[in-house]
Image (cartoon, rainbow, N blue to C red):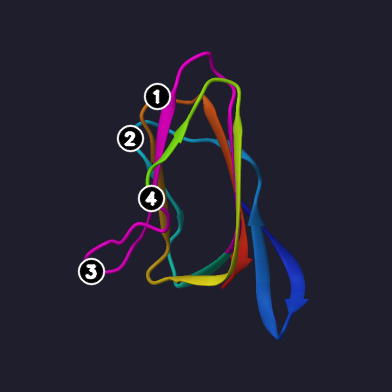
Amino acid sequence: MSVTINGVMGTSEVAIVPKLIPLAGEFVFTSNFEITELHLVNESTSTVMVTITDNQATPRQVVPDVVMSANTDHLRTFRGRACPGGLFWSASVDQVVTGSVRGRL
């Protein structure tokens, strides 16, 4: 579920409600998207790897795989990294990393 935040530079800024990232992965956005902020929180006692890609014909990583130690967080800011076709993420351990994303459609 995304939340629309009114007008930034004439575009629609959106943010998703923080959610657990599944092992099988999921599309966070399914249309062209510019990411401005990514926040991940590993709430487990295990090391977890999170993979984040765009959704172009040959998906490209948005960032290198993020390896998170137990009970840590990862915050990354961007100036509008294009994600053609949307944004997809998955985690090596099911439902233990909370992710949130902010950007522009």
Q: Amino acid at mark 4?
A: Pro
Which tag, 4 or 3, sits closer to the chain's start?
A: 3
Q: Dot 4 corresponds to which residue?
A: 64
Cα–Cα gap, marks 3 and 2: 20 Å
Cα–Cα gap, marks 4 and 3: 19 Å
Q: Is residue 47 left or right of residue 102?
A: left
Q: Residue furthest bottom?
A: 10
Under tag 3, what secondary structure? Answer: loop
Under tag 2, what secondary structure? Answer: loop
In the image, which disc is placed on residue 57?
3
Q: Amino acid at mark 2?
A: Ala
Cα–Cα gap, marks 2 and 1: 9 Å
Residue 35 in percent (x, y) is at: 55, 64
Q: Amino acid at mark 3?
A: Ala
61 or 4, which lies in front? Answer: 61
Which tag, 3 or 2, sits closer to the chain's start?
A: 2
In the image, which disc is placed on residue 93?
1
In the image, which disc is placed on residue 24?
2
Q: Nearer the viewer, mark 4 or mark 1?
A: 4
Which tag, 2 or 1, sits closer to the chain's start?
A: 2
Which tag, 4 or 1, sits closer to the chain's start?
A: 4
Q: Amino acid at mark 1?
A: Val
Q: Residues within 10 Å of mark 3 (few under 14, many from 20)?
A: few
Magenta-highlighted residues: 36-63
Q: Nearer the viewer, mark 2 or mark 1?
A: 1
Under tag 1, what secondary structure? Answer: loop
